[in-house]
Image: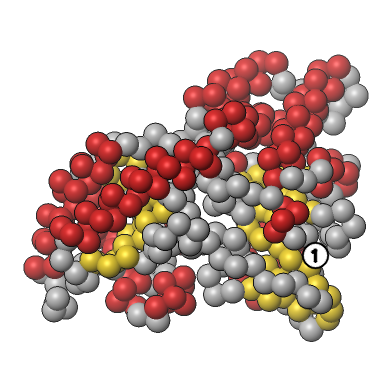
Amino acid sequence: MIYLDHAATTPLLPEVLSAMHQAEKHFFANASALHTPGHIAKNQIEECRALLAKLINAEPEEIIFTSGASESNNTVIRTFEGHQIETSDLEHHSVFEAANAYRGKASPRLYSYMLVNNEIGEILDLPDKKDGYLHSDLTQALGKIPVDIKKLNLDYATFSAHKIGGPIGVGALYVKKNAPFKPLIIGGNQEGKRRGGTYNTIGIIGFKAALEYIDKHKTWQIYDKKIRNLRDILAKRILQEISGSSLNTNLKKGKSLPNILNVSFKAAEGESIQLYLDAEGIIVSTGSACASGDITPSHVLMAKTGDAEIAHSSIRFSFGLDNNIEDIDKVMTVLPKIIDRLQKISTINL
């Protein structure tokens, strides 16, 4: 299998899997308990908190563990229920749907803008927060590009372990000291009464192992060189070898993540391309994996292009640290044939 859907979720790093197996044996106790095993488990959690804070230039007490990015996003937006909430048309569903549900007219205003788009990989300019507070979903950014909370001037930021080789079901929320905050989950003293519920200790230990891997290997440097090169080679070959292809990702350095490539193929439907590639053992996605099964065109591509045909014919390739040039060769052995087959049976003229 050639896995090119890392923006949806990443395989567990071997170091993460090992750390979680060890955690099952040694750190299984309730981290809120007063006994020694509880303290030992809590220490592991605090080590993860400190490491994430170090990597993003924050303070450990500004980090809250959650079940993932969707919970983190909802927590921030629900904090501003009844207030003005401003977002872009490119946001993840967990941001713009929550904003639609909770926005009102009161001040101060919340600005919620992702730093990196999950479908096309575009690196976006964050707004001046002016009369309010600024939140950014950094789920796709961590580990791929340098992240500095203070330089970004953020009040809130969202992270998810399964985008960096960690487990599904654990994430984090950065909340700047003294920024407004209302817990989404109440009924416990965990996280300083900011997020109730028994700690997902084993998941957080897996998160820590993934963060340790990022820190040790400086993965953003690997993405900037090796992975960007692979992405650009694939883009160039697609444009050269496949008729009717066009890029939805800006390849210019600094304009997009180095590991995401979104491509449209005229007169070829995206889900059909995905399924044909899947039959060949090549795993990609159409737009955002969180919206799979939704037959409406990608809201991101509609916002960027206004063209439903482009949106419906798009495929997202997203690379990880384990991909190599042989993967590109295999893709280009089968992809041109798949597109040609679909274009020949299409009613749309090239």
The vertical placement of 156 against 42, above or below, is: below
* Count of marks overlaid on the render: 1
Task: Tell me the residue at 39%/34% (across/down).
Answer: 322
Query: Who is closer to the viewer here, 84 or 215?
Result: 215
Position of residue 307 in the picture relative to residue 90 (left or right): left
The vertical placement of 20 against 324, above or below, is: above
Task: Report the quarter where the C terminus lies.
Answer: bottom left
Task: Tell me the residue at 20%/41% (across/down).
Answer: 330
- Residue 93 in the image: state x and y as whole percent: 56, 65
Q: Quadrant of residue 30?
A: top right
Position of residue 258 in the picture relative to residue 269 (left or right): right
Q: Quadrant of residue 309?
A: bottom left
Query: Could one spot residue 161 in this view of the protein?
Result: yes
Q: Quadrant of residue 164?
A: top right
Task: Determine which residue is flagged by label 1.
Answer: 79
- Residue 40 in the image: state x and y as whole percent: 80, 20
Residue at disc 1, secondary structure: helix
Query: Who is closer to the viewer here, 49 or 225?
Result: 225
Position of residue 34 in the picture relative to residue 333 (left or right): right
Query: Could one spot residue 64 in this view of the protein?
Result: no
Task: Tell me the residue at 54%/75% (across/down).
Answer: 89
Task: Tell me the residue at 40%/64% (across/down).
Answer: 250
Query: Who is closer to the viewer here, 94 or 293?
Result: 94
Query: Who is closer to the viewer here, 64 or 245?
Result: 245
Position of residue 304 in the picture relative to residue 71 (left or right): left
- Residue 7 in the image: state x and y as whole percent: 46, 50
